Image: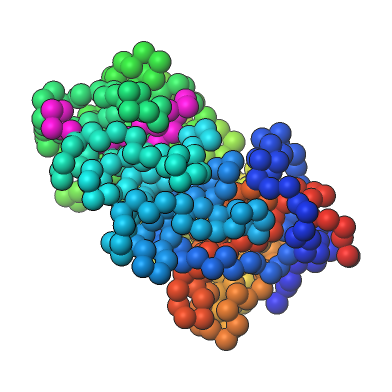
Amino acid sequence: MRRWSAAMVMTVPWLVGCPYVPEAEEVSARGMVHWEVCSADAVALGATAVELSEDSRSMARAPWGLLFVGEGPGLGREPWVSSGSQGMGTFPLKELFPGPEGSDPMELTRVGERVFFAATDPVHGRELYVSDGSAEGTLLVADLWPGEESSFPQGLTALGGRLYFAAGDPDHGRELWGTDGTEEGTTLVADLDEGPEDSSPDQLVPGGDGALYFVAQDRGFSTRLMRLEVLTRVVTEVFRIPSERGVQGRPTYVGGRLYFVAGGGHGEPVALMVTKSGGAPMVLGRFDEVRSMVGMRGRLYFTAAEWGRHGDVEPWVSDGSTVGTRRVKDVRPGPMGSMPEQLVVLGSQLFFVADDGVHGAEPWVSDGTEEGTALYEDVAPGARGSAPRSLTVEQGLLFFGADTGEDSRAPWVANGLPGGAASLGYLVPGEEAADPRGFIRSGWDLFFTATDAKGLRQLHALPFRPEPACGPSAL
């Protein structure tokens, strides 16, 4: 199996005397290129990390460390903080709900130097919290629905230095709110369905045009795509469709346009649509289904099956016009489709997982053209494939977990160049699956979770720093 080599700028471990997070955040902000994986040996941090799902946002980086959802002896799910392989260590930040039940933090979202999340305590129920990384600075933002009912904040989204979210209160029902992190700065943004009825805002998406887009309901009859002009707080309706058809999934903003999928049901196709600055939407194409969407170089890349070709899911691209909406490549010719998923962007390359029917599920790469779309790495040769998971791009490198069919599922790293993928080693030798996932950089470490020998999901830190912070190379 290929390991990290000199050509891949691997350096020796160097874990002493390295400045902690603020310096790392400043380096990242300055855009200094070329970060290095300092060691193939991840540090087990001795904390049980909780992941309800890969998109539950159970970890968030901040200038003061990694905030994550953890469990410990006698503790339920609570906010924890870690400095990784350096600094103060890894420990519970604050016990918001004493005892084994826990506060169950979710949707950890960074805004500036603080992290917001929804959590439950025995007095206020489920409400919005904010943390500056200290126990005393981890506080209830506002008790929007006093008592046992709770406001149940969801859809936490950062935009323009504020947090926007959906929540309920007894006077307005479930509507759109915004906050600066203080009780007095937490206000109702839009009461779309006046009175205690709900418009239930969902799928909040920041736009590069100074607007927040979201999906809302109109008394159960219609689903609406809305646009909030953040500075003026003017809300306009962009698109409306009967609720039984609805807006499917999360819209994606790229290249000055918002793309979204609407319709479907009752044997009808779904429509890929686009709007610019809240203007009248245009249909770009009709499909049997549309799955993942991501932006690269001003274009939308997505996975879809053409209308009438059920299950033939392949990679597609759109430049915002009907003529420029086309399939990138028929990766798996025939009716089955390669089922591409986990689309991520590394520089000017699109990476995804697909099965061409020969190599099994493996990482693929594309520059947006048919001839530039190819198998990137045959991690596990043969039709079984390595089934890569949790594809994540951090500081110019691609990380993922893959199953080589040997001792365990291992973490891998790739630099995007041909032959530039390598295993970082096994975390739990002899076990069936360490299953690394949830990769996220914070400070000068790459954090991820993996199961230990007892099957518990533990937090790990892999030293990951800008050149030359890893120290002198031994190669």
Helix, strand or loop for the magenta stretch, by majority: strand
Please check the rendered image and state whether residue 162 is part of the magenta-colored stretch, yes or no: yes
Q: Position of residue 288 (x, y in %)?
A: 31, 51
Quadrant location of the C terminus in the rendered image? bottom right
- In this view, the residue in front, 280 or 92, is 92
Q: Position of residue 134 (x, y in %)?
A: 49, 44
Quarter location, residue 415? bottom right
Q: Position of residue 187 (x, y in %)?
A: 29, 24
**Above or below for 311 versus 41:** above
Please check the rendered image and state whether residue 308 is part of the magenta-colored stretch, yes or no: no
Report the span colored magenta: 157-174
Q: Is residue 452 left or right of residue 261?
A: right
* x 80%, y 58%: residue: 9
Residue 393 visible in the shown view: no
* x 29%, y 29%: residue: 177
Quadrant location of the N terminus in the rendered image? bottom right
* x 76%, y 51%: residue: 18
* x 28%, y 41%: residue: 127
Q: Position of residue 41 (x, y in %)?
A: 69, 69
Q: Is residue 82 left or right of residue 121?
A: right
